[in-house]
Structures are given as structure tokens and as C-alpha cells.
Amino acid sequence: MLTLLLTTLSQSGGHSIHLNKQPYHAALVLTEICIEMRDVHRLSGTITDDKGGVLSVHVVNGTIADYKMSVAPLGHMPHGTFHNISASYLCKGKTVSVTGRATFPPMATEIVFNAPSSAEVGVIFLKGPNPPPPPPPPPSCATTGRVNQSACDAVKPASGTGPACSWCESKDGAHKLCFVHDHKPDAADWNCDR
């Protein structure tokens, strides 16, 4: 059985929470439970303090079938209030059941699935759609500049001024390579253009 914990960052002024296709993306996957990195689960439904509720969960990527999450009435413990929750979904033909606790004031910002019989995190969902992928790395001496001297000399520094790369030829004539300008090979063995 997996443990599911939803946490929040702020308090609610009302007694019900309304979710309308609110996206949560899998930001970290450490356990094989048929959920993949960057999966998006959209939660819809209403939760009340006195009755709880049922959330419909649509799995946008289709890695698992859509499922329902049952949310119990509000409970209390020494460090705050919570809702017990439970959900089941199919994973490779087998039913995976998750239980745990949730707080929804005003909207959950994180969902954590823990691995069975373990305190280790299995999956972390964060509120919102997937962030854009990181930009590609800047051109480097080892990739863009390795083609020839012109390409090497054309590589721009990632920051600052001055040359990024230097085209160097071994004195024995066996090698012609592009090096990071600040880390050129020994001048006793190589001739560099800068």
C-alpha cells in the first residue's frame, strides 16, 4: 500500500474547497508505480470540512487510467487539521491502492506518494503544469568548435568578454583540437592561435 500525502502552504477562510481540473505534475519519480516524470494529473471536485468529498483525477498523459480520490471529513491532530484520503488505480493490470492525509486550504500545492512500508518518497507532484524545459546549453569548444579553426574561433563566451576557445595544433602535427581558452594545453607541446 502506498501512502499519499497532500500538503498546502496557506490557511483557508471557507469550509469548502473547489478544484476544477487543477493540474499537478510529477516532478520527481523514485518508485515504479506506473507514474512517469512530467505526468500531469488534473483534480476536479469539491471538498467540505464536514463531509469530505470525491475528487475526479484525469491523467492527461494516459500513463494510467483516470481514477477517483475519496476524501474523508476534516480530522484533527496536534499540529493541524487534515483529511484522510484513499485512491486506487490500475498499474500494469494490477490495482494500486494509496492512502494518506490531505490538507486543502485553499488548494493543495504538493502531492507525495511514499513507497510501500517505507519512509522513502516514491513520487512528488507539484501544483501546476509542467515547467518549460531548460534552455539548451551554450555552444562549447568541445561541441560547436571541434569542427575546424573557424568554428572554434567563432564560439562566443558564455559570459564576459574575450575569446571562449582557442584552436591548437600539436607540435608533432598529429592533433588539431579546440580547447577552452583559459585551459589551453602546454605551450611546449602545442601551438594555439590565441
Image (tube, grey):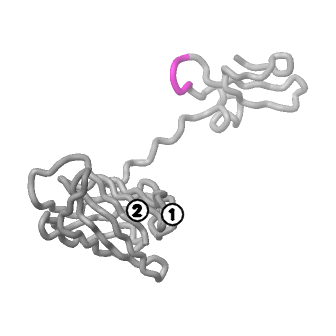
Local packing at callout 1 (Cα closer than 10 Å; few below 14, some 14-19, many 20+) is some
Residue 70 location (% of width, % of height):
25, 72
Query: Looking at the picture, which amino acid does disc 2 mark?
Result: Phe
Read off the magenta span. Answer: 157-161
View extreme (bottom): residue: 93
Q: Which mark is residue 31?
A: 1
Residue 75, disc = none
Residue nearest the observer in this picture, 129 or 17: 17
Q: Quadrant of the N terminus?
A: bottom left
Please indicate whether residue 169 sits to the left or right of residue 51 in the image: right
Location of residue 143 with respect to 17 vertically, above or below? above
- Relative to 89, is 29 on the left or the right? right
Work out how far the residue at label 1 is from the one at label 2, CA to CA, in angstroms: 9 Å
Q: Is residue 16 left or right of residue 116?
A: left
Residue at the location (12% across, 67% down)?
50
Q: What's the residue at 84%, 26% (across, down)?
A: 170
* Residue that badge 2 annotates: 113
x and y percentages locating residue 59 in the rendered image: 35, 69
The local secondary structure at tag 2 comes to strand
The quadrant the C terminus occupies is: top right
Query: Is residue 165 inside the magenta stretch?
Result: no
* Helix, strand or loop for disc 1: loop
Seen from this angle, which residue lies furthest left? 14
Q: Is residue 140 above or below residue 14?
A: above
